[in-house]
């Protein structure tokens, strides 16, 4: 999918509707279905060579380093996934966005690094290593899918208020309150590999299959320790995405996420299955480009669409 570079005009602030603190949550916006994207046009390669991928510490891969980018997008992979899943997304996004993909332990280049004992420990560790890269005043956003969506949200919540991302995009995951009741809780690793659509990518190599299954088993064990506790919602804007053909979600209605933010909220159904961004698909490039460029578009094919907002005076403008 080819993204368009936003113009240099100033970004209008997201219009927020003030709501008294004691008022009940408003009715969630209806689930929107994005139209199928047209065939991507042929792109002439740039004369300038692309920057080589680099690793930042143990925890982050920058598939397409862009040190002058205005926004850092931190990406959190699915259960069993690795940072390389976001390479096509990193290359397809607008140059104003630099992707920092999380490298979880116990897989890939970190196969010898132990996974933290439980979800709370993993959240705390990721929050610790990500905080130095979220300097106050620098624009940042989180994107996570499936297991990574829950982790992205909990890490955002665990960060100091002045280092939280302005935007959190969660894909293919029920809300935290519904997480323990999800239909996938009784699936084994092999079934999960099949339902995520990744089985075909590794099936030709038995060693890759076993490595993928080992990573999934590790993350499923951590996922099983997650416990949701009521807490104040984030002020960050939050978008919840679902693939129209996701076999893992009981419903594409993800309005349960609305209770977890005081900022703008919207939900959208996109073409695709459980994982929107993979090693062979860039994922929701148009939507992320639109959001990160300051155009909160519910329809990623329209630059003038306005997202439904549920916000207070704490909602940041972006």
Image (spheres, helix red, strand yellow):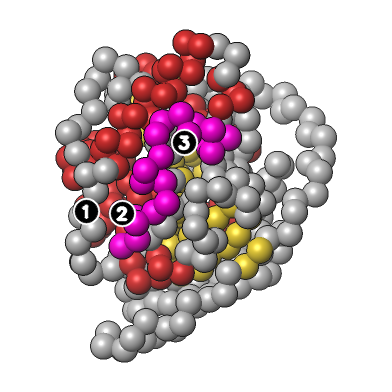
The numbered mark at residue 180 is 2
Local crowd at mark 1 within 10 Å, few (<14), some, or many (≥20)?
Answer: few
Residue 162 position in % (x across, y down): 25, 57
Q: Is residue 287 left or right of residue 183?
A: right
User: Mark 3 highlights which residue?
Assistant: 192
Mark 3 to mark 1 CA distance (whole Å): 21 Å
Residue 42 position in % (x across, y down): 82, 35
189 is within the stretch colored magenta = yes
Residue 116 location, quadrant: top left
| Earlier residue among tags 3 and 2 | 2
SS at mark 1 in the image: loop
The quarter of the rendered structure image containing the N terminus is top right
Residue 281 position in % (x across, y down): 63, 35
Q: Which residues are magenta?
A: 177-197
Local crowd at mark 3 within 10 Å, few (<14), some, or many (≥20)?
Answer: many
SS at mark 2 in the image: helix
| Earlier residue among tags 3 and 1 | 3
Q: Is residue 301 left or right of residue 62?
A: right
Q: Nearer the viewer, residue 268 or 219?
A: 219
Q: Is residue 307 visible?
A: yes
What residue sits 78% from the left and 34% below the top?
Answer: 43
SS at mark 3 in the image: helix
User: Mark 1 highlights which residue?
Assistant: 227
């Amino acid at each position: 999918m080819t993204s368009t570079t936003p113009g240099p005009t100033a970004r209008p602030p997201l219009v927020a509707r003030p709501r008294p603190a004691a008022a009940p949550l408003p009715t969630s916006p209806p689930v929107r279905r994005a139209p199928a994207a047209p065939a991507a046009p042929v792109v002439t390669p740039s004369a300038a060579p692309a920057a080589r991928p680099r690793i930042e510490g143990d925890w982050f891969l920058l598939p397409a380093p862009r040190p002058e980018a205005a926004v850092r997008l931190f990406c959190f992979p699915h259960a069993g996934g690795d940072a390389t899943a976001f390479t096509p997304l990193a290359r397809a996004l607008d140059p104003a966005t630099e992707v920092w993909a999380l490298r979880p332990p116990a897989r890939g280049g970190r196969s010898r690094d132990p996974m933290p004992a439980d979800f709370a420990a993993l959240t705390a560790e990721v929050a610790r290593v990500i905080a130095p890269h979220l300097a106050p005043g620098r624009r940042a956003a989180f994107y996570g899918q499936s297991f990574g969506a829950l982790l992205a949200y909990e890490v955002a919540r665990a960060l100091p208020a002045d280092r939280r991302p302005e935007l959190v995009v969660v894909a293919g995951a029920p809300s935290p309150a519904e997480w323990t009741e999800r239909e996938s809780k009784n699936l084994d690793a092999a079934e999960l590999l099949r339902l995520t659509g990744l089985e075909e990518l590794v099936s030709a190599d038995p060693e890759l299959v076993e490595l993928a299954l080992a990573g999934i088993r590790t993350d499923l064990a951590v996922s099983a320790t997650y416990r949701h506790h009521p807490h104040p919602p984030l002020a960050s804007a939050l978008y919840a995405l679902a693939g129209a053909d996701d076999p893992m979600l009981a419903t594409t209605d993800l309005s349960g996420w609305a209770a977890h933010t005081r900022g703008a909220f919207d939900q959208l159904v996109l073409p695709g299955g459980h994982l929107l961004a993979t090693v062979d698909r860039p994922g929701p490039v148009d939507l992320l480009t639109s959001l990160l460029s300051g155009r909160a578009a519910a329809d990623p094919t329209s630059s003038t669409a306005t997202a439904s907002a549920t916000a207070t005076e704490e909602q940041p403008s972006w």
